[in-house]
Image (cartoon, rainbow, N blue to C red):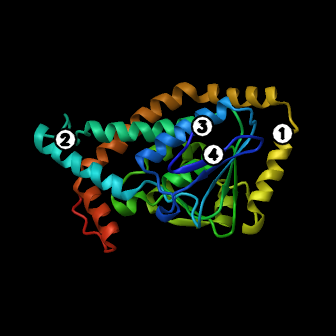
Amino acid sequence: MAYATLHLDCRESPATLTFNRPEKRNALSPEMIEELLAALDELEASGARVAIVTGAGKAFCAGMDLDALKALATQAQEHKALKGGVLKGGLPRPSDANLADSRRMARLFRRIYDFPKPLIAAVNGPAIAGGCGIATLCDFTLAAPEARFGYSEVRIGFVPALVSVFLIRQIGEKRARELLLSGRILDAEEARELGLVNEVAPQERLLERARELAAELLAASPTSLIYTKRLFRELSKEQLDRELELALQENARIRSTADFREGLTAFLDKRKPVWRGE
């Protein structure tokens, strides 16, 4: 099928899935998330046994599209005004739109994590917030020296809820706390040292190196690869279900706060936020 926000070539192995919103640094809009889910379905049904995921332009993926998030935040404010907006215990009530958007993102992360065929991320530039999640949820993460990684959500009044579920498994809770609470950005080499990246390759050789790795995987038994990936999936299935449900509720709830609206507005206006602590 034709896609507006990405390009998929699965005529042979390895297949290539390219985020194609370079003017938006490949930020994740609702449309792009839905197209990614559809592309993964198409990829699974194809004869391609391995896929490379990369980005068009200078970025891999800059995370969520903040203009789209701001529109949802406006809807959440209207929802709060109409329905009171507070749950028992004083927590803000997430709007239906924000819950649906959070659930869509959780579905994408889980689909990548559970995907039955090996995925290789070729990170050509910044992979921030949700983009970092996608890059590091792939089975292998290769990065150019120009790549940057990090979870900057706290800097804009958001919460890195969904990615935290997977990040703790990848690098441990202590390091996950450091990255998620500080919002600091890592270069490719530090990301490799922490275990988020498998290998750093020169930009001009990044895709070539990804194809070399894909060739190694293609030499293995396809049945063995599928069974091994299924084992990883089944080992953590029930716990992931519980944790992701909790995380997506927090992801949706933060969007009803004043700090979230201020953080988004300040970022889009290119000014420092004035936090209200609510």
Q: Quadrant of residue 55?
A: bottom right
Return the residue at label 4.
8
Q: Mark 3 Cα within 10 Å, few/some/many (few <14, many 20+)?
A: some
Query: In terms of depth relative to the viewer, which is nearer, 160 or 271?
Result: 271
Return the residue at label 2.
90
Checking the image for residue 60, the label placed there is none
Return the residue at label 3.
40
Work out whether 190 lies above or below 95.
below
Return the residue at label 1.
218
Residue 268 point in image, percent of width and height: 33, 67
Q: Quadrant of residue 91?
A: top left
Q: Residue at x 60, y 60 (%)?
A: 56
Residue 89 point in image, percent of width and height: 20, 37
Q: Is mark 2 on a helix, strand or loop?
A: loop
Query: Do the CB atoms of the residues marked 1 and 3 lie less than 8 Å apart?
Result: no
Spatial CA distance of label 1 from label 2 is: 53 Å
Spatial CA distance of label 4 from label 2 is: 45 Å
Q: Mark 2 Cα within 10 Å, few/some/many (few <14, many 20+)?
A: few
Residue 79 point in image, percent of width and height: 18, 42
> Which numbered disc, 1 or 2, marks the residue that appears first in the sequence?
2
Residue sitting at the far bottom: 271
Residue 170 shows up from this direction: yes
- Camera-side mark, 1 or 2: 1
> Which numbered disc, 4 or 2, marks the residue that appears first in the sequence?
4
The amino acid sitting under disc 2 is: Gly
Spatial CA distance of label 4 from label 3 is: 9 Å
